[in-house]
């Protein structure tokens, strides 16, 4: 792995007797040489132990094979697993990833995008939600977003509506007295708003007693626990003795809610059914494994990179055809029944 | 943010009346120009709305400002939080990160390093453990490792020995009948072996009844739970009625062990004290918050990048002075007392 002295185009030209221009053509447009000459140069590279200088090559043909990623954080398991799956696509597509953490700072994220563009990245995958899709579409390179507002750019999202339908339908089979959906305030243009629509549609279709509780939960465990404790205390009073089917918008919150009940009762009482969303590891590892709507993160990541590669390839053609409309792919979620609904 | 037509050195030369060589010197060695001429060119760049082409600049001065990272996975919260903190150092140091997931495949990791070197990265941060430090030292660029075998390269690690001493000393204050350390088989050259030495030293110094249980736990939750259940069943028989102080090598395992006890008894029985390692979120969010030895991940990440930047800067000097010995920094861990030891 020791770095050798770099072999230059000059060296290769001297060794083969070709001009430097011919060597350059070999790297940037090999088909313009005869097969025989390609083979002579290929053999010379191996004889000279040539190490490709990709930076020089980028300058020659503009292909950096870099994709920029901006992700809000890696604390949330959904994001770290998504990044994990995106990085693993290197094996299939060969693109390298320059990664930035946005932490919801709009000005920083704008600066990161400028920095990435200065490095001639070929495409962008955006999971953070601070910069409007209108502005992302103007960046001049292909963009694919995941689970954020995506009106003007291509995207891959979970079928959130179907997920909401699945979770609510499962609770509905248990003859609950009341169905409750707990979520953060979510604007309708965000894909995850579909979970709320799915919940409402099933409740209305089946004429079920229902309620949505919106709350700003905060970003720390302590705040999330405090807010969920307040909700639990209110539910204990309002629906005492009633069978409660509770659909919580993510597994992290569902687990905190479950633990509050276990601290109080030593187990999950029979009048509570709980289902989360995401299929985070915590849903499986909880004291009582939590039913959930599983997002196919590996599939979402693969489809996002695959779609971006298509857009980048189109752009490299002599006469690229611009998209008339952004492409929005949706990936079906999977209902996972565990102990918090199956008793 | 729309990409404009690139302004070239030619354009700047024409606009200012300077030669292209002078413009090039402005970018690569500005101090070789007078302050007055620097200002003229600087104003021209702004007038022309010049967008820096970093790729061209890299080719001119060899400084890519790229650091490569190879990390085993992002499933383990320790790794995802470490990556998070490393990426955030962009704000201080300006280096960009090309990230690869190794997944413990030695051949892939070797290929990733070749790929990174082809892109003229300036330095490497390695958290994966498949490639011996002897080989990493031969890569020809500065390398800093975190928590892995590091004989021939610079590294930043937690003071694992001190962590083992802290955890064991805390259990020792509780007059346990037996102290038990549960860990995976760990070779002495790995930094985390210090936890085992710390445990043994305190037990021997204080003449405490003690035992180490080594077990290969596996990589899935199901395997980890199965293996810890077997350990628990054995302990329940071997030390029935005795007060057991248990130091578990990481918080993920400590949480699974705690949950097994809660499933069996509805709470943590008085004859069990538990302390983990890492201060992962799960230790705080467990049904009963778990005492732990906190790794200062933000500090480790900062020191690793900071040390790497020093090494990279030295290498850019006209007469770089090579290190006589690799530098190994250690960061003190912090004992965190929570409910599993304070009852």
Image (cartoon, coloured by chain):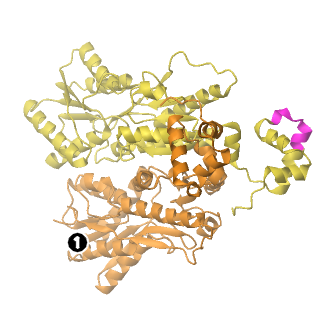
Chain colours: A yellow, B orange
| Residue for point 24% across, 41% down | A218
Quick check: A114 above or below B141?
above
- Picture quadrant where residue B301 is located: bottom left
| Residue for point 50% across, 28% down | B2
Mark 1 crowd level (few <14, some 14–19, many ≥20, 10 Å Cα): some
User: What residue did someone put label 1 on?
Assistant: B243
Horizontal arrangement in the rendering, residue B71 relative to residue B200 (left or right): right
Quick check: A149 above or below B246?
above
The answer to whether residue A32 is magenta is yes
Q: Position of residue A324 (x, y in %)?
A: 54, 15
User: What secondary structure is found at the residue carrying circle 1?
Assistant: loop
The one nearer the camera, A249 or A65, is A65
The one nearer the camera, B94 or A303, is B94
- Picture quadrant where residue A79 is located: top left
Quick check: A157 above or below A96?
above
The answer to whether residue B200 is magenta is no
Q: Position of residue A4 (x, y in %)?
A: 73, 62
Residue B119 appears in view:
no
The chain containing the residue under callout 1 comes to B
Q: Position of residue B246 (x, y in %)?
A: 30, 68
Residue B114 appears in view:
yes
Q: Which residues are magenta?
A: A30-39
């Amino acid at each position: 792995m020791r770095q050798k002295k770099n072999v230059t185009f000059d060296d290769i030209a001297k060794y083969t007797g070709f001009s430097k221009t011919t060597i350059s053509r070999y790297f940037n447009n090999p088909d313009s040489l005869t097969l025989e000459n390609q083979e002579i140069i290929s053999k010379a590279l191996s004889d000279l132990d040539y190490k490709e200088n990709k930076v020089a090559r980028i300058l020659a043909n503009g292909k950096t094979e870099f994709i920029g990623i901006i992700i809000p954080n890696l604390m949330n398991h959904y994001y770290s697993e998504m990044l994990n799956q995106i990085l693993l696509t290197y094996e299939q597509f060969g693109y390298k990833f320059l990664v930035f953490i946005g932490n919801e700072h709009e000005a920083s994220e704008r600066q990161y995008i400028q920095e990435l563009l200065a490095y001639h990245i070929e495409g962008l995958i955006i999971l953070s939600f601070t910069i409007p899709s209108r502005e992302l579409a103007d960046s001049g390179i292909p963009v694919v977003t995941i689970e954020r507002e995506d009106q003007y750019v291509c995207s891959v999202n979970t079928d959130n509506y179907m997920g909401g339908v699945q979770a609510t339908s499962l609770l509905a089979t248990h003859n609950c007295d009341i169905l409750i959906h707990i979520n953060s305030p979510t604007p309708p243009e965000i894909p995850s708003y579909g979970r709320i629509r799915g919940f409402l549609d099933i409740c209305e279709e089946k004429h079920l007693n229902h309620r949505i509780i919106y709350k700003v939960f905060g970003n720390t465990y302590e705040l999330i626990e405090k807010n969920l404790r307040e909700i639990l205390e209110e539910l204990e009073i309002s629906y005492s003795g009633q069978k409660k089917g509770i659909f919580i918008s993510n597994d992290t919150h569902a687990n905190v809610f479950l633990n509050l009940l276990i601290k109080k009762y030593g187990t999950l009482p029979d009048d509570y059914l709980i289902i989360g969303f995401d299929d985070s590891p915590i849903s499986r590892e909880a004291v009582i494994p939590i039913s959930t709507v599983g997002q196919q993160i590996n599939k979402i990541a693969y489809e996002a990179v695959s779609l971006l590669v298509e857009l980048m390839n189109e752009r490299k053609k002599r006469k690229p055809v611009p998209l008339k409309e952004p492409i929005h792919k949706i990936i079906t979620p999977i209902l996972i029944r565990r102990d918090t609904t199956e008793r």
